[in-house]
Amino acid sequence: MNKKAQAITFGNAPRLVLLFVLIGMVLGAGVIALASFRDSTTDSEAQSAINNTIEGAGNLSAQLPTVGTILGVGLILVVVIGVFAFFAVRGV
């Protein structure tokens, strides 16, 4: 079976949006759970580790709009290149 790789297309856009929403929900739930655990622990080393983890998750979630912009530009480029390739093959 010869299966070709699939590019990012408009048909995949809803999946990508849902993926970003899912990532945001998981990060948000993780940060909330860690914050509540941080309040209940008395170990300063554990609190420091939890604070570092929350800060790292915040940095990661701050980059999601950048990743979305890069994927959007990539999608536009794929469509434009696909149109040019289509017309080049047809000889129009």
Image: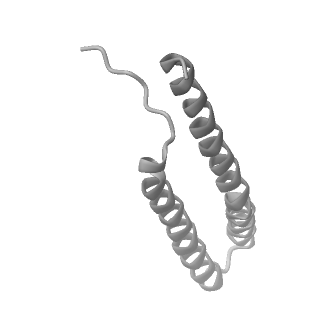
Question: Residue placed farthest to the front in the image?
Answer: 92
Above or below: residue 9 compared with residue 14: above
User: Residue 48 at x, y = what percent?
Assistant: 75, 68
Is residue 79 positioned above or below 51 on the image? above
User: Looking at the image, which is closer to me, 44 or 38?
Assistant: 38
x then y, percent, for residue 68: 65, 55
Q: Residue at x 49, y 43 (%)?
A: 9
Is residue 60 visible in the rendered image? The answer is no
Q: Classify 65 as above or below 85.
A: below
Residue sitting at 71 percent across and 63 percent down? 49
Please state which of residues 30 and 42 is positioned toward the viewer in this rendering: 30
Quadrant in which the C terminus appears: top right
Residue pushed farthest top?
Answer: 2
Q: Quadrant of residue 64?
A: bottom right
- Viewer-proximal residue among 66 and 81: 81
Image x and y of residue 57, in percent:
67, 63
Q: Position of residue 72 (x, y in %)?
A: 64, 51
| Res 28 visible | yes
On the rendered image, what quadrant is the N terminus found in? Answer: top left
Q: Residue furthest left?
A: 1
Q: How many marks?
A: 0
What residue appears at the point 63 percent right and 47 percent down from the top-left corner? 71
> In terms of depth relative to the viewer, which is nearer, 13 or 90?
90
Residue 10 placement, left or right of 24: left
Q: Quadrant of residue 52?
A: bottom right
Q: How is the image coloured?
A: one colour
Question: Residue sitting at 64 percent across and 78 percent down?
Answer: 38
